[in-house]
Amino acid sequence: MMIVVWGVILACHLSAQKNGRTEVFSNRVKSLQVKVAGEQISEPYIELNSDHRLEISFDVLNHTQGQYAYSIIHCDADWNPSMLTPIEYMDGFQGMTINDYSPSFNTTVSYMNYRLYLPNDNIRFKVSGNYLLYVYEEERPDRIVCSVRFGVYEPLIGIDATASGNTDISFNKEHQQINFQIDRKGVTVNFPEKELKIYVYQNNRDDNVARNVQPQIITGNRLTYEHLRELIFEGGNEYRRFEFLTHRYNGLNIDGIGFYNPYYHADLMIDRSRMHTGYRYDQDQDGRFFVRCSDCNNPDTEADYYIVHFTYASEPLLEGDVYLLGDFVQNQFNETSRMEYNPQTRQYEKALMLKQGYYNYQYVLLPHGETKAQTLPTEGDYYQTENEYTILVYHRPMGMRYDRLIGKLTLRNTHFVL
C-alpha cells in the first residue's frame, strides 16, 4: 500500500518539474553528493553489470536519527519518466530503507550522515539509461527531501572527441568547439538521425547542454559531428576555489573565521568580475566539492558546518540575476543559489551553511526570462579554460520503449587542438 501511495505522490511531483534533476527539497538536507564509489572525482555513471557502484551521500540536520527510504525511476534521455515499469528495469523493490547512517561527532551543528550504494543486495539494474533516485521520509512518502540523477551505460560504441579554441565563429577568443566521431560497429543502427540521441554537457551543467545533435557526415559505421553550431560553448573561466578545514586558521580564499553563537562563520575574500583580467591558469575540479577537515579521522561525521559568506562586488546587473554555480548548489538556479544585491555595500551577497571542505564555485548571470546562464559578465570567457565535457549517446530503435545509453565519453581539455 505504501508503494502505491508513493507512486501517486511521485507522479504529481514529476508533473510539476520540467525534467528530473539532482536537487534538494528540504532545507535540512545538506552536502548531497553522488559519485562512483572509491573515486574522488567522477561523474554519476556506471557500466551495466560491472563491479562499479555509485555512492550517494547526504546529511540531515537533526539531533536524532530519522528513517529515510528511496525509490528509483527509469527515465528517457531528457530525464522524464520512461515507459518501463520497475520490474522491467531493475531487480528489487521500491521503498527500501537507507540503513547506513551515522551521527555527527564533536561538532557544533548536529547532523546525521546517510549513505547509499547502488547496485546493492536489494537493487540490481537490468537495463541501461538514465535513472532518478528519490529520497523521502519513510513514514511520510509525500515528504521528498532530495532527488539524484545518475546513469547506467553499455560501452557498445567508440567515441573519439577533441575540444578546440578554433571555432566556426571565432579563433582562440571566447569559445570552445567540440568535434567528435562515433564508431557504431558494436550496435545495429539503421537510421542514425532518428534512432540516436546525442547530449553534450559542460561541467555537469544542465542549462547549456547541447541536445539531439545530428551527424554531419555518415560513412559506413562512422558518424562525424563537426562544424556544428550547437557544439560551440562559451569558454568560461577556471572555477574560483576556497577551503576551510579548521577554525584555528584561515584557509584558501578565506578572509576570516569567527564563532558567533551558535555557528562558526567564514567570510570569503571579496570577489570581482574577471571579464577583463585575462586568462590565468588555476587547477580546479570543474565545479566539484570535497568534504574534509583537519584534526579529524572521519570527515563524513566529524566535519562541522559553517555559515559561509560570499561577496561579489559589482554595480547591479539589471538585465538579470546573479547566481552561484557549482555542485554544492547542484548547478541549479533557485533561491539557494541566487545572490542578493545590497545597495548599501554595492555588492552581491549570499550566506550558505556548508560543510568543512574544499569547494569550486563561479558567479553567473541569468538574464530575465532565459534558462541559459552567461559567464562573460562575471567570470569572462576564455578559449584556454580547462572544462570537462561529457558526451552521452542514447539509442532507441523502432519498437523499443526506452532510451538505451550505449556510449559515454568524458573529455577534459587539458590541451587544445588549434
Image (cartoon, grey):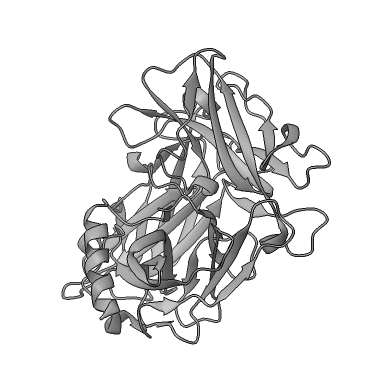
Q: Residue at x 45, y 85 (%)?
A: 122
In the image, is residue 4 above or below residue 135? below
Q: Please state, as top left, top right, bottom left or bottom right, where the C terminus lies in the image.
A: top right
Residue 36 in the image, given as x and y percentages of width and height = 56, 68
In the image, is residue 236 above or below residue 31? above
Q: Nearer the viewer, residue 398 or 191?
A: 398
Task: Answer with left or right where residue 411 lies relative to residue 230.
Answer: right
Residue 188 in the image, given as x and y percentages of width and height = 29, 75
Q: Please state, as top left, top right, bottom left or bottom right, where the N terminus lies in the image.
A: bottom left
Q: Residue at x 47, y 83 (%)?
A: 49
Q: Which residue is drawn at 77% across and 39% down?
A: 251
Residue 269 in the image, given as x and y percentages of width and height = 69, 28
Q: Which of 228 and 124 is in front in this view?
A: 124
In the image, is residue 187 above or below residue 112? below
Residue 414 visible in image: no
Residue 83 visible in image: yes
Q: Which of 5 and 397 is in front in this view?
A: 5
Number of numbered callouts drawn: 0
* Residue projecting furthest to the left: 399
Q: Nearer the viewer, residue 241 or 249?
A: 249
Residue 414 in the image, given as x and y percentages of width and height = 62, 46
Task: Answer with left or right where residue 40 lies relative to residue 399.
Answer: right
Quarter of the figure with residue 37: bottom right
In the image, is residue 399 above or below residue 205? below
